[in-house]
Amino acid sequence: MSAASTPAEPSGPSSVRDPAIGDATTADFAGLTPPVVVACSGGADSIGLLVLAADAGLAPIAVHVDHGLRADSADDVEVVAVAARQLGVGWHTVAVVVAPGSNLEARARSARYAALHDARRDLGASAILVGHTADDQAETVLLNLLRGSASAGLAGMAPRRGVVARPLLGVRRAAVRAVAVGRGLPVVEDPTNADTRWRRAWIRHEVLPLLERGAQRDLVPVLTRQADVFRSESEFLDGLGDELLTAAQGPDADGLAVLPLRSAPEVVARRALRRWVGTPPPSVDEVERMLTVVRGDRVACELAGGRRVRRAAGRVLVDDPRQLP
């Protein structure tokens, strides 16, 4: 890990905008305290976020994660270093190893976030800032819709989740790019962003423009507004699910009592079961199979990761091979 020096820690405002662009780049920095880690790939979104965080007095430290997947990744590191030096902020680079398996994008994301969390702790930062924009949110909603996600997936990305903050979810991608370019900072153009063999790039360049032509309107505000609605409803249902989970667990820590689950509305029972089995989160189909066990239509069902949910003596139990000696 290499680094430049980090400036002092002034207190910043809850939001900031680039005066050359106006309200289109108002970033939500409410509740954040310096210093913060900015996940910085070198792309226009992350460089623009670094600019706005520096302007807000958050003493950002640009952390670049090198996945080792591209031969020219050293160029990305140099772009981040140049931007950090021009802004007078600290920067670090971390190399990670992406685990083998299917779904390269998901495996790279997992390695990236693990490295960012480690960097935040090592650097004593209060939060990790990620440069996802309103356009990214709209694409995520469509991606999750095509996957058959429930309301939690259709809620898209949360503005805050633990120490991870996304201050630009209300800002358009073009406006963030204008901030980086307007300061004369270099940016990286990731070739995979234009390769429609990747599902997100396909959504961005083909699906969303096609829908907008048919609807004759800009759909990004529509989709982000829908995500906000789904998120508020999903969080409300999560609260009801947690209450049901507590009631079903009772004084016995082993499994859940069937009767409270059967008596509750299915939409709430689904939430309780999903939160009970933990990670990896069960799919919609797996939750429905668990409900058949609760109802007594079957005695057991299989879940991803070798887990097995079964019914015995009026309770549902989960057998997880990862927890065996």
Image (tube, rainbow, N blue to C red):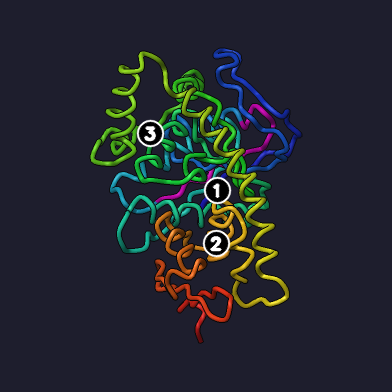
The circle on residue 151 is none
Q: Amino acid at mark 2?
A: Leu
Query: Looking at the image, which residue sits at the far right?
Result: 11
Q: How many marks?
A: 3
Query: Looking at the image, which residue sits at the far bottom?
Result: 325
Residue 8 visible in image: no
Q: Quadrant of residue 167?
A: top right
Q: Does residue 166 show up magenta in the picture? A: no
Q: Are marks 1 and 3 in contact (CB under 8 Å)?
A: no
Q: Is residue 179 left or right of residue 188?
A: right
CA separation, marks 3 and 2? Answer: 43 Å
Q: Quadrant of residue 4?
A: top right
Mark 2 or 1: in front is: 2
Q: Amino acid at mark 3?
A: Val
Residue 182 visible in image: yes
Residue 242 pos. (x, y %): 66, 57
Q: Is residue 5 left or right of residue 189?
A: right
Image: 312 above or below 52: below
Circle 3 is placed at which residue position? Answer: 188
Which residue is drawn at the image coordinates 58% and 76% (left, top)?
A: 314
Residue 238 pos. (x, y %): 62, 50
Which residue is drawn at the image coordinates 33% and 30% (left, top)?
A: 204
Q: Is residue 131 left or right of residue 304?
A: right
Q: Is residue 116 left or right of residue 285?
A: right
Circle 2 is placed at which residue position? Answer: 273
Tell me which segment is drawn in magenta. Answer: 53-66
CA separation, marks 2 and 1? Answer: 45 Å
Circle 1 is placed at which residue position? Answer: 3
Image: 170 above or below 73: above
Mark 1 or 3: in front is: 3
CA separation, marks 1 and 3? Answer: 20 Å
Marks 3 and 2, the one that precedes in the sequence: 3
